Amino acid sequence: MVSRNPDQTRKKILEAALEEIHLRGFQGMRVEHILQRTGLTKGALYHHFTNKMAIGYAIVDEILGQDVMERWIGPLADTVDPIATLIAICEGERAGRTIDEIEKGCPINNLSQEMSPIDEGFRERLEAVYARWTEAIATALAAGQQQGYVREDIDPAKVARFLLASLQGIIGVAKCCKNEQALDDMAECFRGYLMQLRPMESSLKTAS
Amino acid sequence: MVSRNPDQTRKKILEAALEEIHLRGFQGMRVEHILQRTGLTKGALYHHFTNKMAIGYAIVDEILGQDVMERWIGPLADTVDPIATLIAICEGERAGRTIDEIEKGCPINNLSQEMSPIDEGFRERLEAVYARWTEAIATALAAGQQQGYVREDIDPAKVARFLLASLQGIIGVAKCCKNEQALDDMAECFRGYLMQLRPMESSLKTAS
DNA sequence: CAATTGACATACCAACTGGTCTGTTTATAT
DNA sequence: ATATAAACAGACCAGTTGGTATGTCAATTG
């Protein structure tokens, strides 16, 4: 048992804070609760972060940005068939998620809905995450067009934005409705839209 | 100048509260700010509402529910061509909305993202609004199918949910990105999806 | 016209909350 | 070994915030 490990302490703080924020929102998150979760004290916390806001910023930049990178940007960079990859990612994210998880929503969407109008620092950071995310989808779609996996007549950048927005909308509505069936119904329509992005011949044979 | 008008006072409180909530979220909304906006005092406010939460509930039930009724459910009930009506409503909502308005997002979505995991009372009320909203779209789509304005092979209930979710997602992403062009790009894709819900023959001639 | 109730005003409070200050312990460099 | 700085501990504080208690004034009722 190592008594001093600043990097791990910092990480513990961020992870505990993320859980609290995921549950209560940033404004509803209490510094005191982070201390309870981690067993640390205020001295430790304010040694690593100048204030509450800095914790939120660090979560966006480090944890959430990293998550998007690993779960979306990475897989999309390695594929020639973005539509299949997007469907696979969605199914992977959906699988093993209980109704309790669904009710909490997507941390990125939650934070951007809550904080982007209130604090410009949050907005800029979240926008940056969205920008990278969107660009990865757009790039993959464009590559898919060249390989014949995606219709030529769509604008990859516009569709990428729409896909991301739809996804966030689905997660957001499901969160409020607290209904797994509703989530899967919406996901089915989302897949339908994705399939319809395939070139005509293959869309006819791929769609059930 | 009428010195006593309880109904109007109540309404003034709700409207001021909605503006504050729209800007700061429910948790970020301060009772004190409502008093400043309305020029009332705590005695008046707590005479009309038992606590802060009751103000939030009343806003959802009365103001937001009413808005959805007037702007969406009404028009959808009076149409035979739901796709055209949906596009018209969206354009109407979009028109005359400045970037500042866009940055604040949709109050219903904001509230449901922030409060539905935290407070069951909020969640139930917001879910009820979503349910009526979705049902109105679904009913209109089904009617459109019978009139030949909508493809027969789609499930109105599922598509209705997806449409609503996509719309909320678009508004949510645009809010964070603070970018009118991005909003219009996503809206264009949304219209594309709507057009594609038309029967085959007419979709070919209606789509530009 | 008295009396009772609804509609507000004002002062006040207790709890909460982010943040600070001082002190202590551990690691590291010399 | 010792100085020095980083990593923490814990008490404390000032501002905020939702909510309350009491009082006043207007409106309605009998």
Image (spheres, coloured by chain):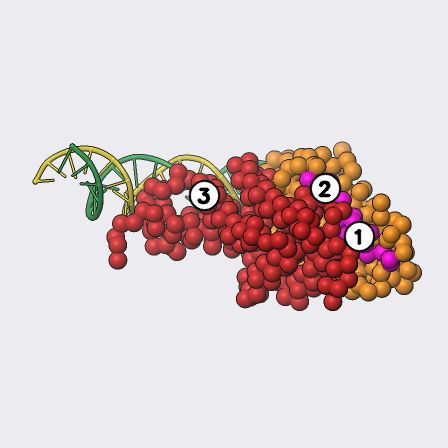
Chain colours: A orange, B red, C yellow, D green
Q: Given this view, does label 2 or label 3 mark the residue nearer the observer? A: 2
Q: Is residue B9 left or right of residue A74?
A: left
Is the residue D23 above or below the residue B82 in the image? above
Q: Residue A194 carries which label?
A: 1
Q: Residue at label 2?
A: A185
In this view, the mark in front (1 or 3): 1
Above or below, comparing residue C21 to residue C2 in the picture: below
Task: Work out whether residue C1 or residue A62 is closer to the camera in this orientation and state it.
Answer: C1
Which stretch did the figure color magenta? A182-200
In the displayed structure, A155 sits above or below B18; it is below
Helix, strand or loop at mark 1: helix
User: Disc 2 residue type?
Assistant: Asp
Percent across and percent down for residue B112 are 58, 45
Q: Using residue B189 as the reference point, say whether residue B115 is left or right of it.
A: left
Q: What is the three-letter code of the residue carrying label 1?
A: Leu
The disc placed on residue A29 is: none
Return the residue found at the far right.
A147
Given the image, on which type of amino acid does mark 3 rest?
A: Ala
Mark 3 closeness class: few <14, some 14–19, many ≥20 residues within 10 Å: some
> Residue B2 location in percent, x, y?
26, 54
Residue at 76% in and 33% down: A1
Q: Give the chain of mark 2.
A: A
Q: How far apart are marks 1 and 3 (CA)?
A: 39 Å
Residue B24 makes an appearance in the image: no
User: How many angstroms separate mark 2 from mark 1 (CA)?
Assistant: 14 Å
Comparing B6 with B155, the one in front is: B155
Which chain hosts label 1? Answer: A
Q: Residue at x 59, y 54 (%)?
A: B79
**Any mark on residue B58, and which?**
3
Is residue A195 found inside the magenta-colored segment of the image?
yes
Q: Does the magenta stretch include residue B138?
A: no
Which chain letter matches label 3?
A: B
